[in-house]
Amino acid sequence: MQSRTPPTRAGRPRSAAADAAILAATRAALVELGWSRLTLGDVATRAGVAKTTLYRRWAGKNELVVDAVAELFDELRLPDHGSLAADIEGVVLQFAALLARPEARSGLMAVVAEATRDETLRDRIRTSIVDRQKRLVLEGRARAQSRGELPPEPGPEEAARTADLIFDMVAGAVVHRTLVSAEPADEEWVRGFTRILLTGLATHSPFGGPALLEELGGV
Amino acid sequence: MQSRTPPTRAGRPRSAAADAAILAATRAALVELGWSRLTLGDVATRAGVAKTTLYRRWAGKNELVVDAVAELFDELRLPDHGSLAADIEGVVLQFAALLARPEARSGLMAVVAEATRDETLRDRIRTSIVDRQKRLVLEGRARAQSRGELPPEPGPEEAARTADLIFDMVAGAVVHRTLVSAEPADEEWVRGFTRILLTGLATHSPFGGPALLEELGGV
Amino acid sequence: MQSRTPPTRAGRPRSAAADAAILAATRAALVELGWSRLTLGDVATRAGVAKTTLYRRWAGKNELVVDAVAELFDELRLPDHGSLAADIEGVVLQFAALLARPEARSGLMAVVAEATRDETLRDRIRTSIVDRQKRLVLEGRARAQSRGELPPEPGPEEAARTADLIFDMVAGAVVHRTLVSAEPADEEWVRGFTRILLTGLATHSPFGGPALLEELGGV
Amino acid sequence: MQSRTPPTRAGRPRSAAADAAILAATRAALVELGWSRLTLGDVATRAGVAKTTLYRRWAGKNELVVDAVAELFDELRLPDHGSLAADIEGVVLQFAALLARPEARSGLMAVVAEATRDETLRDRIRTSIVDRQKRLVLEGRARAQSRGELPPEPGPEEAARTADLIFDMVAGAVVHRTLVSAEPADEEWVRGFTRILLTGLATHSPFGGPALLEELGGV
DNA sequence: CCGTAACCGAGACGGTACGTCACGTCTTGAG
DNA sequence: CTCAAGACGTGACGTACCGTCTCGGTTACGG
């Protein structure tokens, strides 16, 4: 007969089904209404749940939407197409397809906008989305290195820095193309992007060789 | 002796000073409050203007903020530092500094988020911001080509496509670094970014030469 | 050679047509919209006149409507039907018909309501409407007295007091019937009203004779 | 075993105190500001209540003021002064005192004015005010009949018709005197009014006897 | 017959209140 | 202790009129 603090607290336990229903309702509402017209009252109604239940679990609209959107990004996979270029093209196309979905489009940018003034939200985005998807860069690079397509990293610190940089370049380009420039990131665009990412702008230039590198200076 | 539409319409003309005051007040409010807490009533008060005056000239918060933010981007200049790499680094640092300002940070992303569900707003952003700043890419490329750092373009269509691509890569990377990853785009980061943009990821790889290019295929 | 203030001031004289057009437009707007939805901007538009023109001539909505409504009351006439009872019935029916017209209904009560807090407006109503229509009571009484249906008045002061009282009783009953009780003042009602006005409630009562009068006391 | 609608509905019940506070605040605002300057926002503030709470319970200014004013009329009592004439004078003086209060003056006429264009409001006024105060006429008549001052009614239909008529005559005269003519309904006026109401205009006329009644014809 | 002063239309202006909406909190009764 | 329901205080929304103010342009007198 033990009398330790029970792991299950007193009273009626929280409905497990409610969380899933709420996140799904949030995504549905994002599709139909977009961020700014999305209402917590409406989400609660869609989920068949009271507004109080919703506020018991999330602090507000921002937090809820981050969680609802973060789940979408976990669908991304790094396929093995046999070469670094093909792998990049594959994952970039997946990302582009994701950003074509309205719940991801408006949800993502809106929480990023809010995060510019909210340290907590910024951390939540980094934890739930950014850091989690960096796995794609790390996996891709490791695979390319094992294939011999990329040289090994000089050290762990430099490796992390480069991974971050590449992640920002890839994700940033796709996001900017689809959301700011508002043009589709189609196969043609992805091929052009991958080419520049891998070989650089100056490839064919007469100065594109060692001279250029020298001029760039060491890092 | 022409009798075309008279330039002065009937009635009291709109105050020219009001427009400037409103846009400045909008930026000030963005700094203090951010997008979501920004209120048109508050902007009107700051500008010493009635709310109705504001609604007479802009359809809503989105349109107003696009105009207020667009003016910021016109400050960007392409300095001539003597080489393509240095020019890129210079303009990217300027852009990073701009995105470090709170009125640009929250304003820009918020209107992009809204634009995901608003065709009209999307056009306004493209016209007022995106297309206007592409000048930086075009100038930079032309200068680099005249220096011989970059090869001439095969044709006008390809030239436009590449300019768009580069713009998305540069702007996207900086935006993603500063707003999504929420890390500063400092000089070190800018150097690394410029290196990859110019020479590509695969530069030092044993496969980074003609073999890689072949594998990438033509565009 | 006189140098007194000239009766015609310098400059362009006010358009005479405008006044009539504005008052007519006001009545039309009262019919369609009623008092509370009536807008001076709308009246100006209907009259084909600028808002400033309207404000140059009337201080506001109240004053304008009093003038617009007052004109209606001047249509009332006291017909000679040969007896006091028939004359009263005739004029009451005319008044009831007037109060059945929407421009009179809503206009009259609304300005009366406003006048409860506006001494100036109260005077304007008294001058433009009330005092002007007392002529009906005075004419009717004089005619009845010349017919011998009513006794002559004891003195001028008493005569005025009684005329006011009768006016309030007649006009008040019709107004209350049509606007407050919101029932039609039809012929049957008017016959009943006239009978009580002329012979009193207590006519057939066994106490309705001298005893009652004594009980009422002198005035 | 009945399954009728449960008396207690789900959710938080409406605050009972709020209703009283709102109606009192409405009357206070009427006193200070009058009808046209009365603001629902201001009423809400005075009542220590949110504007939304107010709109949850009343459809608008009109409905609210009808209810606020109707309560005032319930204060009217028919005192027993021993004779019909004295009873009438008593209740008329009460009514005059009520109409001297600013909250009744402006409130009553304003809603009547609005009611000229609003069937629903008209019904509300009839139900809440007019029909409710007819009790005074019915009581007074019954008392006078039991005293033998008035003859019994020929039938129920005729009784109702006459009660309505008397109510309109009494209430109408007082309203017109105080609000339209804008003169006080003081004791002297009330005595004169009561005399005419009970004995008629033609009392002392040589033709005021049976001949007049004949001339008036049957109803 | 010509200047000029007051008029006119149009419409922008600073305000005030509107009635609605969503927020996030609270109060209820049931489980 | 949670849940659904729904009322609550708060505060911004976008609209409608208010009454005032510039505009450019138009009359009709009076010198």
Image (cartoon, coloured by chain):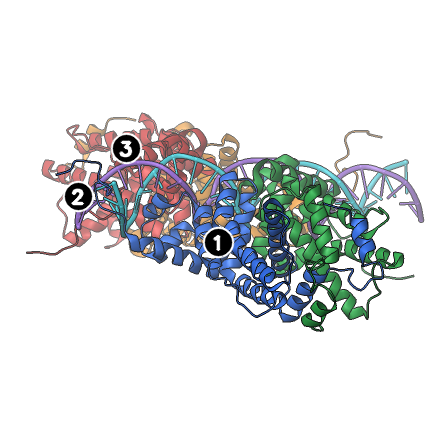
Chain colours: A blue, B green, C orange, D red, E purple, F cyan
Q: Which quadrant would the N terminus of chain A be assigned to in this image?
A: top left
Q: Identify the element where label 3 is drawn.
A: helix
Binning the other alpha carbons within 10 Å of mark 2 as few (below 14), some (14 to 19) or many (20 upward) gives few
Separation (CA) of disc 1 from disc 3: 59 Å
Q: Position of residue C205 (x, y in %)?
A: 15, 41
Q: Position of residue E24 (x, y in %)?
A: 40, 40
| Pick the front one: A52 or B61 | A52
Binning the other alpha carbons within 10 Å of mark 3 as few (below 14), some (14 to 19) or many (20 upward) gives many
Separation (CA) of disc 2 from disc 3: 23 Å
Q: Kindly identify which residue carries mark 1.
A: A37
Q: Kindly identify which residue carries mark 2.
A: C204
Q: In this view, which residue lies farthest toward the bottom?
A: B218
Binning the other alpha carbons within 10 Å of mark 1 as few (below 14), some (14 to 19) or many (20 upward) gives few
The subunit letter for the residue under badge 2 reads C
| Pick the front one: B39 or D141 | B39
Q: Kindly identify which residue carries mark 3.
A: D92
Give residue B119's mark. Answer: none
What amino acid is labelled 2 in the image? Answer: His
What amino acid is labelled 3 in the image? Answer: Val
Q: Identify the element where label 1 is drawn.
A: helix
Q: Position of residue D122 (x, y in %)?
A: 34, 50
Looking at the image, which residue is at 36% across and 53% down? A44
